[in-house]
Image (cartoon, rainbow, N blue to C red):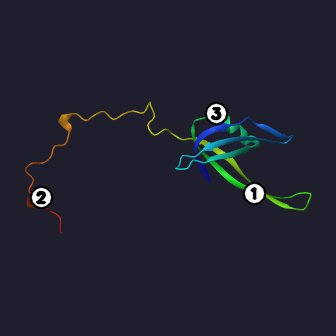
């Protein structure tokens, strides 16, 4: 699955335990009703966010994770998380440095045919 949008927040990495770290980011989708999606990157994937900045358009590859937990009172609870495993920049629609096509000289422009007669040029079989 993928989430596309603009980076709204990139948090610092959190060392949750001696062997586990995570880093969270928020991506705001670009749709009629924008959503603010919190995505967590874990372990070595935390470093993927180092070169990204707030405001950049990105595409994040994600996995949905769900888990079950039984509290001390015996109640079962369910938790979901969105884990990122790849992130890439989206290109702007018209990059500033993109080469533009030069205008066609008037001598090469197409001119309408003025002496066209349909019966003379109709070589189609129907």
Q: Mark 2 and mark 3 in contact (Cβ < 8 Å)?
A: no
Instruction: Identify the mark nearer the N-term, 1 or 3.
Output: 3
Task: Residue at 68% x, 41% y: name it.
Answer: 25
In what element is the residue under mark 2? helix
Give the alpha-carbon distance from disc 2 to disc 1, as whole Å: 68 Å
Which secondary structure lies at badge 1?
Answer: strand
Q: Quadrant of residue 90?
A: top right
Sequence order check: which comes first, mark 2 or mark 1? 1
Q: Which residue is mark 2?
A: 121
| Nearer the camera: disc 2 or disc 1 | 1
**Rendered location of residue 36, percent (x, y):** 63, 46
Residue designated by label 3: 51
- The residue carrying pointer 1 sits among few (fewer than 14), some (14 to 19) or many (20 or more) residues within 10 Å by Cα, namely few
In this rendering, the label closer to the viewer, 3 or 2: 3
Alpha carbon of mark 3 to alpha carbon of mark 2: how far? 61 Å
Q: Earlier in the sequence, mark 3 or mark 2?
A: 3
Which residue is pictured at 13% across the width and 61% down the height?
122
What is the number of callouts on the image?
Answer: 3
- Dot 3: within a 10 Å radius of its alpha carbon, few (fewer than 14), some, or many (20 or more) residues? few
Q: Quadrant of the N terminus?
A: bottom right
Residue situated furthest top in the rendering: 97
Residue shown at 68%/37% (left/top)? 10
Q: Is residue 65 above or below residue 19?
A: below
Q: Position of residue 98 (x, y in %)?
A: 42, 33
Name the residue located 65 percent from the left edge and 42 percent from the top edge. Answer: 26
Which residue is disc 1 drawn over? Answer: 66
């Amino acid at each position: 699955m993928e989430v596309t949008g603009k980076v709204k927040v990139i948090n610092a990495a959190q060392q949750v335990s001696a062997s586990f770290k995570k880093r969270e980011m928020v991506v705001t989708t670009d749709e009629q009703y924008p959503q603010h999606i919190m995505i967590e990157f874990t372990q070595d994937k935390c470093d993927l966010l180092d070169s990204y900045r707030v405001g950049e358009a990105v595409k994040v590859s994600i996995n949905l994770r769900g888990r079950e937990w039984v509290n001390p009172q015996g109640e079962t609870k369910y938790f979901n998380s969105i884990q990122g495993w790849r992130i890439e920049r989206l290109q702007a629609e018209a990059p500033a440095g993109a080469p533009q096509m030069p205008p066609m000289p008037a001598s090469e422009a197409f001119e309408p045919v003025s002496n066209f007669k349909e019966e003379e040029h109709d070589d189609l079989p129907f």
